[in-house]
Structures are given as C-alpha cells and as structure tokens.
Amino acid sequence: MWRYFLPTKMLSGEGVLKKEKDNLFKSNSAAFIVTGRNSARACGALDDLYSIFKEKGIDSVLFDSVEENPSFDTIRKATKLARSENCDFVVAIGGGSPMDAAKAIAVLAKNSSLGVEDLYDSSKYNAALPLIAIPTTSGTGSEVTQYSVLTDDEGNKRGFGSTVIFPKVAVLDPVYTVTMNEHVTVATALDALSHSVEGEILNDGVNLFVKTLSKEATSIIRKTLPKAVLDLNNVEYRKSLHYAATLAGIVIAHTGTTVVHASGYPLSSSKRIKHGIANSMFMVDVLEKIGEENLEKVINGIEPFASLEELREFYDRFGIYDIKVEMTDDELESWTKKSFAAKHNKRTPGSFSESFYRTLYEKVREY
Ligand code: NAP
Ligand code: ZN
C-alpha cells in the first residue's frame, strides 16, 4: 500500500513570479515577508516581489534576519512582529532556513495563544497563515514539505511536521539560485541528494511515485553537479538542480529522513558545518551498515549510482572526506547519545548501536 499527497501548487520557470502575479496575490492584502540577511535581495527575488506589491497595492512587513539553522529566539521575535501587524499571508524567500522559519511563524501568527514549543505538538493547531515559498537554494525541498527544522534554546536541531505548514504555492525560478557561490551550491545539492537517497532507502521501491522521483533526482544531481560547479552562471544547470531538489523534497515529504540527517545535525548546530555537507560526511558509512543486513535495499536506494564505491568517489570529488571537526570528549559523547536517541534511529533499517555513532564522530574528529 502507498499514498501520495502534495497540497502545494508548483509554479516553475524563469520570471514565473511576475508572470503569475495575478494568480498569486490579491490586491489590498498584507504580507509578512521572511528572508535571510542578504541573499533575497542579492538574487533579485525581493525586488521582484516589491514591484508586484507596489503595483497591486499590497502592504508588507519584512523580517530579514533569519540565520542559518534558525533559532527559537528568531521565531519568537518574528512572531511578535507578525502578530502585531495582522498580515494575511506569509512569503518566504531564501534557503531552508527562512522557509522553515516562515512555516513556524505562519502557525504562530494564526494561533495567538501558542508558543514555539507548542509547534512540536501538532494536535494544538489546525491552521496556519497561507505561505508562498520562493526557494533561492536548490537543496532542502522545504518548499514542498510539511517539515520545519529549528534550533532550540539548548542548541539542538529539532524538526516538527504538520500538513498545515505545506506551502500553498512553491515559486520555482532557477534564476534566483544563480548567485549561490560554489560552497553553497555544493552543500545544498548534496542535501537534495541525501533526501533522494535516504527517502528511497526508507521507501524501498514500495511507493512507485517516490521511487520514480528519487531515481530522477539522484540521476540529475549525479550528472549535473560536477558540471554546475565549473560553470556557476549556467542557468540550464541551475534549472536542473532546482528541479531535482524539489523532486527530492517531494520524496522526503512521503518518507522522512534517516539517521544520516540525525547524525549530521550536531555538526551544523555546534560547528557551523552546512547541513548538506554534514549529511554527506556520514552517508556512505550509514549505507554500508544498512548493506550488512540488506545490500539490495542500498543498491536500490542509490540508483542510478551503480555502487557504494561510485557514491563515495562522487562525495570525494567535493572534498567531503577531507573535512575534520574539532570536538571535545563531552561533545562526542553528547552527540553520540543524541543521535542514538533520535527518532530517525527507529525508522532507519538495520541496527545502529550507540557505539556506531561514536565511531562515526571519531572518524571525522580532528586530532
Ligand atoms: P540556508 O541556511 O537557508 O542558507 C545558507 C546560506 O546560503 C545563507 O548564508 C544564505 O544567505 C545563502 N543563500 C541562500 N540563497 C542564496 C542565493 N540565491 N545566493 C547566495 N546565497 C544564498 O541553506 P539551506 O541549505 O537551503 O537550508 C538549510 C536549513 O534547512 C537547515 O536548517 C536544515 O535543517 C533545513 N532543512 C529543512 C528541510 C525541510 O524539509 N523543511 C529539509 C532539509 C533541511 P542569507 O542568509 O543571506 O539568506
Ligand atoms: Zn536535509
């Protein structure tokens, strides 16, 4: 048995925001815009939005200080502003961080008695302000998922999920991604690869939509990323990577992610290693472990990579195995315990002991 559910409308193509402005926006409404510090302006999306708003008489308030791995405090600040401004809808422009922050703000602005911890009990809310997501990275797929990953007051990355936070519309314009530098391009594309592979490991061919989307997303990233890093202004490559990231987002919307994501989280929240890079550092080790019990599942999950060796070589091209991380003994122990306790552990096939995670972190430790 399988199910396929995606309530997000997708609009894709160069210049699509302006072309679809009459379908996207109602005159005389009020928008709450959520972005990071620079990229929404630098990529041109914010200016495009403002010129449409001016033409249609739409009021807006801008919250432009979402950081990478958005914190509870950022959500609290933005929520306070959103509640005081009485906006009708939310627009997120940016990578996964602004999009995930916007999802949290959309729930809290609609449900004025809730605090940020309440987001983690989805029985406490059944509506959010409508969200238009404009991704400017090609990675998280957050524009088509029901997830949001925030960093709590103790510095732990924690995801919540609810169907009410699926964006109403995803506006997919590859031109907005051209300003990404090489490092962000690689990190985000490898996150999308991680979603595609981890999702299919969990799906194992059962949901035929998921299998098809995963194979296509993995294939595009495998073929395109090595060329894209050599030609960052090439819009055709950008278009392919943007499409692949959205496909991989649809994959995880149906499957969730594995212990690869859970093990990578501490490296992002404590050591500022980009999310997609952190996943990639552990991917092959985790797949090898799964393969000890079920190699066929792994071979299916990484398709069209022909072998784990080919996947390892792919990561190696981007320097993933050169990365070493300074960590104290206490950090190593606490990350090990957190990864072992994460809910991803139960859903990932194979047996992952506490010592497995300790070995993962020791392997990347800077001595
Ligand atoms: P990000 O944290 O949103 O942004 C990373 C960096 O890229 C920021 O410095 C950002 O600058 C910059 N950037 C974004 N777009 C750019 C552009 N077009 N040109 C130049 N620079 C640009 O990165 P991300 O990898 O997309 O998102 C990672 C977050 O998403 C993590 O918190 C992760 O846990 C989460 N995530 C969510 C899901 C989900 O389903 N919801 C799935 C996977 C990951 P600015 O700060 O100036 O914008
Ligand atoms: Zn991810």
Image (cartoon, rainbow, N blue to C red):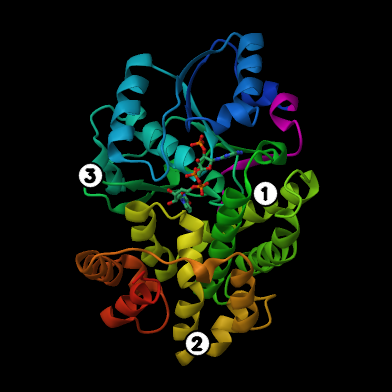
Disc 1 residue type? Answer: His
State which tag comes first along the sequence, 2 or 3: 3
How many other residues sit within 10 Å of disc 2, few (<14), some (14-19) or many (≥20)?
A: some
Q: Position of residue 92 (x, y in %)?
A: 51, 32
The label shown at residue 291 is 2
- Answer whether labels 2 and 1 touch (C-beta < 8 Å): no
Residue at which label 1 appears: 242
The quadrant where residue 164 appears = top left
Residue marked by disc 3 = 153
Q: Which residues are magenta?
A: 3-19
Real-space Cα distance between discs 2 and 1?
A: 30 Å
Q: How many marks?
A: 3
Question: Quick one: SS at disc 3?
Answer: loop
Q: Position of residue 163 (x, y in %)?
A: 44, 47
Q: What residue lies at 27% left-to-right and 27% top-to-bottom?
A: 112
Q: Secondary structure at mark 1?
A: helix
Query: Residue 124: where, in percent of width, then height?
Result: 27, 42
In the displayed structure, 188 sits above or below 30; it is below
